[in-house]
Amino acid sequence: MKSLDALRAPVYALIDPVVRWLVRRGVHPNAVTTAGFVSVVAAGWLYHADHVRTAGLLVLFGGMWDIFDGQVARVSGMASKFGSFYDSTLDRISEIVVFGGLLSLYNSYGRELADVWMVYVIFAAMGGSLMVSYTRARAEGLGLDCKVGLMQRPERVVLLGLGSLLFGLDMNGIVLKWVIVVVAVLTNLTALQRIWWVYRNAAGVPVEDPALPGQ
């Protein structure tokens, strides 16, 4: 799977008129972040309620707002450390909510017993997704720009959102199941890839702050 980083420039150019419209209206980037968060939380509830296609649409919608908030912050000059922290924190919470909704979807009373194994797959996907974000954040805290890996957040949003929107629970949900399996496998591989990357770039490099090893 090719990284979506190459699409950033054309996407930014496409949304620039909307970004500037939001800036002219005085919309705060944190408000945009919150709108995206609300969208994804609603998607988690819709997964729980078996409305998979609508949930997928809201996952994509939330991902769109996630692009807008950074651009609004940059164009408006209102980017801040808190804004970055707020955005990252809500991203992690929203991922937990979405995977929680998927857990509920596959763990509902009366579903086929064969679906129970998906609970473990979803748990692995959630853990892998959080570890992808954590390894990057921890590396950045050490002064390393660790962006390697196939299954970063944009890829997760697009894969899960489109898989849900286009296929829903058609064919007994087999497509959605495989989408989640792919996310579970590639997120954990990405986390391992980032650990290896940090090892190759930081092994033997002394830690300047003596408090860091104990964190």
Image (cartoon, rainbow, N blue to C red):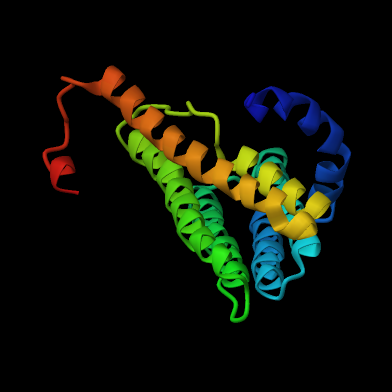
| Residue at the image point whose x is 59% and y is 45% from the top | 79
Side of 98 where 125 appears, left or right: left
Q: Quadrant of the N terminus?
A: top right
**Measuring 44% from the left and 50% from the top, which residue is drawn there?**
130
Question: How many labels, in total?
Answer: 0
Above or below 213: residue 208: above
Between 189 and 27, the one nearer to me in the picture? 189
Q: Position of residue 206 (x, y in %)?
A: 15, 24
Q: Residue 30: x and y, percent?
A: 63, 58
Q: State whether residue 89 is above or below residue 109.
A: above
Q: Could you say where residue 194 lies in the image, as x and y percent from the top left?
A: 39, 30
Q: Quadrant of residue 145?
A: top left
Q: Decide: is 40 above or below 145.
A: below
> Residue 2: horizontal and vertical position, in percent?
64, 24
For the point 42% across and 28% down, the residue is: 146
Work out whether residue 169 or residue 187 is closer to the camera in this orientation and state it.
169
Q: Who is closer to the viewer here, 84 or 61?
A: 61
Q: Residue at x 54, y 47 (%)?
A: 80
Describe residue 167's horizontal placement relative to residue 174 as left or right: right
Most foreground residue, 76 or 35: 35
